[in-house]
Image (cartoon, rainbow, N blue to C red):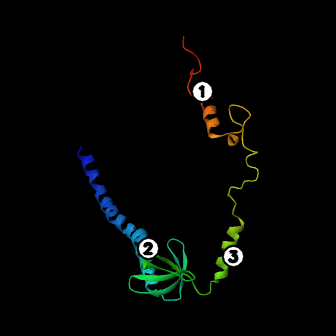
Amino acid sequence: MIIAAGNSGGGGGFGLLMLLAVPIIFYFLLIRPQNKRRREQLSLQNSIEPGARIITTAGMHATVVSSDDDGVVLEIAPGVEARFVKQAVMQVLKDDEPEEALDEDAADEDENKIDLSKKNDGALDDAPESSTGDVKDADKTPGEMDEAAEAVSTGKGADKPTA
């Protein structure tokens, strides 16, 4: 009994070391890098000047028209200006990045799009036949459609008379 009690007290130093090590590890792996990114983002947002091309957090490409303490006025299309808070600026594009390259990417995306618009190129001819016969639902009048719906049974044994 006395030997077991003496051995259980030896783990206190390791426990104390772990208690101190965990917050230090969290600081260096999580808190410090996050603070560094926040400072970089704040310096980027404070260095915005008129004429700079930017990307907002929503992915909108725009040109800075004017800037003040808490916001910027962006030209999002020729002649269209909108006011944003500085925190909406995600990235400032460098002047050496040509805008044509961005337009080429958009053109490539347009080529890969699929046309999903509905066209009436004989679509009624391809309509499936109705469940009641050879007349297509698209060719029926509203009254005929009601009659066809009544003819179809919706419940178990609803067509059978009870005895």
Q: How far apart are marks 1 and 3 (CA)?
A: 58 Å
- Please state the horizontal and vertical placement of residue 101, each as a whole percent of the image: 67, 79
Seen as rendered, the residue at the extreme left is 2
Mark 1 vs mark 2, foreground winner is: 1
Few, some or many C-alpha atoms within 10 Å of disc 2 (few <14, some 14-19, many ≥20)? few
- Please state the horizontal and vertical placement of residue 60, each as a whole percent of the image: 54, 74
Q: Name the residue under label 3.
A: 104
Q: Earlier in the sequence, mark 1 or mark 2?
A: 2
Q: Where is the N terminus found, in terms of image quarters?
A: top left
Q: In this orientation, does residue 47 appear?
A: no
Compare residues 68 and 93 and report the one nearer the observer: 68
Q: Name the residue under label 1.
A: 153
Res 157 quadrant in image:
top right
- Please state the horizontal and vertical placement of residue 31, each as a whole percent of the image: 39, 71
Helix, strand, or loop for circle 1? loop
| Amino acid type at image mark 3 | Glu
Q: Which of marks 1 and 3 is nearer the N terminus?
A: 3
Give the answer, above or below, for where 128 lies relative to 69: above
Q: In this orientation, does residue 158 appear?
A: yes
Compare residues 21 and 30 and report the one nearer the observer: 30
Residue under the image location 72 percent in, 40 percent down:
128
Q: How far apart are marks 2 and 3 (CA)?
A: 36 Å
